[in-house]
Image (cartoon, rainbow, N blue to C red):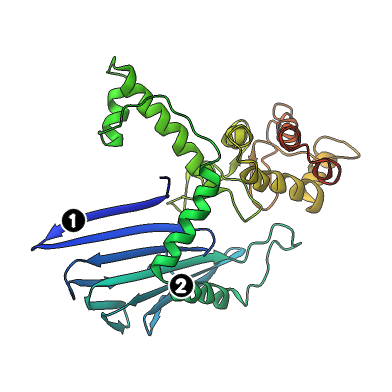
């Protein structure tokens, strides 16, 4: 059963521990649940740390930070709860002692708005929004969060399936990858190919919902403040290729974040229309180039080589119509 949940179990001094992680779209949070099979066996310490020198504050089982970085402001909130443990909050962390289960809920966001003239919205309300999301998810509790997440993810993931082998895989993924070029066993090769297909759909479902932005070179999992190619929306095949599987695997819902980005940047925001006038000397229409970002910027170097980008983008609009036959979308957006 597809769940999009990470699970780990281990034993220490006779106690069996378990931990599960999920990222819930309905609850807009990351949740971590830790349990022990012996009463009072779970003892944990939680700290929160940003990557831009943010100042973290701790109070009453909560941790939070927020900071304006260039244009955007970020905000993060962590709430730790337990049904039976003792929770103590210090100036540098949250400590849980003698618990049987611990739930940590993390919410994070920015004030980005794809259609605002300033690309910003509700900056002053950002701390309250993140805290309320975390509190609401905490009130739901792990059981409800888990069930809601699994149902939500499965609704999309179960729309398509690919079965290449009836043999169950017993190898860790890294060994499966290493053995792919070495083995002559067709079943083992198909196991990796089947997993790769499913993993691609998992990534698309997990990175292309909500905000009107496509996933990019690092998806939504960029782990660096100086990523390759500035973590841009690279349009000489990368972002287009990310969405090739969308319609054919019945995930057109995930395609719309990319399509909305194209519409907003070409019709709502001024930058791409300005490129058409100033760089390509056109009196109408829009242009963008290989390196795009979330503020409408497109690297105009070698523009004579990269004018195919808008054609690629429009092909995605047309493909969505071919699969949906949505004439309202065709008339009003595409």
Quarter assignment of residue 291: top right
Residue 197 placement (x, y as % from top left): 47, 32
Say which residue label 1 marks: 10
Foreground tag (2 vs 1): 2
Quarter assignment of residue 52: bottom left
Residue 287 placement (x, y as % from top left): 77, 38
Lower position in the chain sequence, tag 2 or tag 1: 1
Q: Identify the residue at the far right of this view.
A: 283
Say which residue label 2 marks: 140
Residue 123 placement (x, y as % from top left): 63, 73
Up-down relation of residue 215 to residue 51 (above or below): above
Q: Callout 1 environment at 10 Å: few (<14), some (14 to 19), or many (20+)?
A: few
Q: What residue do we see at 30% from left, 31% from top?
A: 168
Residue 47 appears in the figure: no
User: Residues at badges 2 and 1 in contact (C-beta under 8 Å)?
Assistant: no
Residue 148 appears in the figure: yes
Q: What residue do we see at 21% from left, 73% from top?
A: 43
């Amino acid at each position: 059963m597809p769940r999009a949940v990470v699970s780990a179990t281990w034993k220490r001094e006779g106690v069996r521990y378990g931990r599960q992680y999920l990222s819930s779209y309905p609850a807009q949070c990351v949740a971590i649940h830790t349990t022990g099979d012996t009463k009072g066996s779970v003892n944990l310490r939680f700290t929160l740390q940003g990557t831009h020198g943010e100042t973290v504050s701790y109070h009453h089982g909560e941790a939070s930070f927020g900071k304006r970085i260039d244009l955007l402001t970020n905000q993060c909130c962590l709430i730790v709860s337990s049904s039976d443990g003792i929770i103590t909050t210090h100036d540098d962390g949250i400590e849980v002692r003698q618990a049987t289960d611990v739930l940590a809920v993390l919410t994070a966001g920015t004030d980005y708005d794809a259609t605002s003239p300033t690309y910003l919205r509700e900056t002053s309300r950002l701390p309250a929004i993140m805290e309320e999301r975390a509190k609401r998810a905490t009130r739901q509790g792990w059981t409800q969060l888990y069930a809601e997440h699994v149902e939500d993810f499965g609704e999309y993931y179960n729309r398509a399936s690919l079965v290449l082998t009836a043999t169950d895989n017993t190898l860790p993924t890294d060994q499966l990858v290493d053995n792919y070029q070495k083995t002559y066993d067709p079943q083992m090769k198909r196991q990796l190919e089947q997993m790769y297909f499913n993993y691609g759909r998992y990534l698309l479902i997990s990175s292309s919902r909500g905000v009107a932005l496509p996933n990019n070179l690092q998806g939504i999992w960029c782990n660096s403040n100086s990523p390759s190619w500035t973590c841009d929306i690279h349009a000489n095949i990368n972002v287009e290729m990310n969405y090739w599987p969308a319609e054919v695997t019945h995930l057109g819902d995930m395609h719309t974040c990319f399509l909305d980005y194209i519409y907003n940047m070409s019709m709502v925001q001024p930058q791409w229309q300005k490129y058409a006038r100033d760089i390509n000397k056109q009196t109408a229409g829009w242009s963008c180039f290989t390196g795009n970002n979330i503020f409408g910027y497109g690297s105009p170097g070698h523009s004579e080589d990269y004018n195919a980008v808008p054609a690629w983008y429009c092909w995605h609009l047309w493909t969505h119509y071919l699969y949906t036959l949505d004439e309202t979308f065709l008339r009003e957006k595409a």
